[in-house]
Image (tube, grey):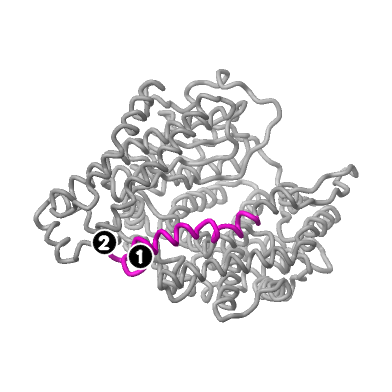
Amino acid sequence: MLSAIKDELFYRSPSFAGSLPAREEIEEKYKWNLTDIYKSPYEWEKDFNWLKENSEKIKEFEGKLVTAKDLLECLKFDEEIGIKLGKVYLYAMLSKDLDLSNSEANGRYDRVVSLHAVIAEHSSFLAPEIQKIPDEQLLKFVEEEPGLKIYSHFFENLKRLKPHTLDTEKEKLLAMAQPISSAPYEVFSLLENADLKFPEIEGEDGEPVQLSHGRYSSALFSPNRDYRKRVYKNYYKPFIEHKNVLAALYSSNIKGSIFNAKARKHSSTLEAALFGNNIPTEIYENLIVSVKANLKPLHRWAEIKKKVLKLDELHPYDSYVTLFPAAQKKIKFEEGKKIVLKALEPLGKDYVTQLRFAFDNRWLDVFETKNKRSGAYSSGTTYGLHPFVLLNWNNTLNDVFTLAHEMGHCLHSYYTLENQPYPYADYTIFLAEIASTTNEALLLNYLIEKSDSQKERLFLMEKFLLNAVTTFYRQTRFAEFEKITHEIALNGGALTYDNLCEIYGKLYKEYWGETMIVDEEETYTWARVPHFYYNFYVYQYATGFAAAQAFSERILTEGETAVKDYLNFLKAGNSKYSIDILKDAGVDMNSPQPVLAVINKMNALLNQIESSIKS
């Protein structure tokens, strides 16, 4: 089956609570209506059994795609399997996530995951077989059979992949080598999550606290500087103790990338990583160049933080703490809905109407309940069904932003599904975070404009700046670090902990400027970031953030024309390559304009903050 199930959900940070209500205590209107998928588990079983009994029939087409009719029949049967498989998977996943202790639901999920692997094996012949059809013959098939016309871009993309697709035996060898290539990440993950022992330290209240990843992250927001410093210094200790092993793992991961890139005849690991989504390496490189040319807003922010916090020296453990603590209002879900609906009015009547429809028709599962999955996500695109959004509402402003974020994903999926045929009814990770972040940008703008408190406005402005620091500047710094270290390895250089620390420390200083003191611990950040094992993944956070600011700025200043372009972006799915979809919507990622949209917004907010501080 060519269309894989979308298992990359859009997760947000988990929520925490004490005593949780049982699911039956929650009003129906705040719970998913899973009968939109299947009326009962019995109906699910019928489709599951049909897939078990019929999916292997796809293999009957192997070696027989010799006419236009044969090709169309094969693709249509593959779609029939894919649509049913997507449906049984979604129902199994959602019902499991509502109660992780439910053995029946867990069993359904395990069964469909196993079935998916079997079906993928059955249909594995299809892409290579289409690639073998001569271009002239494939063009003739499309002319002969009108039903094949919608597959034109699909065929074009398969042909694009052909120069880097090997013969059957070599592809099998690469597949056999995959567990070896992924071993560094597997070892890193085990080390980081299971074997690293973090020390116990004195907490904010004087009581002993066992450090962990989560406690480290939350501690950086603490107003108690001694506590922040204590957590920061101790958190890095196990990473420094294992610096040789971690450097070897990182280096081995890059060597695996080099092996795969060379085997597939790519000129670099960067090209290999971006090739799948047809992203030119210039996009990656231009991001770094454009951001590096616009570091002054980050330097300004460092100076402001040092001044307002009244510090002799600014250290990395000071970079997250708020300068403008505001009293946290409790925001109930119904109020949060109204805020989001109002904030997203600039997207037009159709968008808001569909958003309200989703709220009123149980597309969301809102409240935390016993054994429900933590965090938040949107289920993505499942052909023939609407998306579903999981929340764990705790009456905070962050919950309102999470709602806007996840509904951005949700309506991106909705518009894609409503406007695209099955082959294009999805979108790439490169595009995925843009719709969600655009919603957050519009929400932030609305809240700042409507705020009647200077203190609250400053808090909201700071929220944007923190997002820009973590999602835009930090991820670009990570992207540059990856580029430098991969190039060293490609040129035969060694990657020891010493030069990894030197490279990362130099970049950290360059990005933050002279105001920031770079502690030794910070230079070991490379040793603790799992995304560095994903190979050129993190740049998409920065490009997505930049594109979202460009969209939101156009929507707020240009109105209807920009909204039309934006809705066309949401509707495009995979009907074109990601870069072209953005360009059609007025955002050119080859230009510095999206980056400048972030810079301009940062400077405008920094001006307001500086003016408020002086007054």
Is residue 49 depicted above or below 456 in this figure?
A: above
- The magenta span reads 159-188
Q: Residues within 10 Å of mark 2 (few under 14, many from 20)?
A: many
Residue 157 percent across, percent down from the top left: 30, 61
Magenta stretch containing residue 572, yes or no? no
Is residue 519 depicted above or below 457 in this figure?
A: below
Residue behind mark 2: 131
Is residue 356 depicted above or below 237 in this figure?
A: above
* Amino acid under disc 2: Gln
Magenta stretch containing residue 163, yes or no? yes
Residue 495 percent across, percent down from the top left: 66, 74
Q: Is residue 191 left or right of residue 538?
A: right
Q: Residue furthest front?
A: 169
Comparing 305 with 38, the one in front is 38
Q: Is residue 546 left or right of residue 499?
A: left
Q: Which mark is residue 165?
A: 1
**Residue at (47%, 37%) from the top-left corner?**
389
Image marks 1 and 2: residues in contact by CB distance under 8 Å: yes
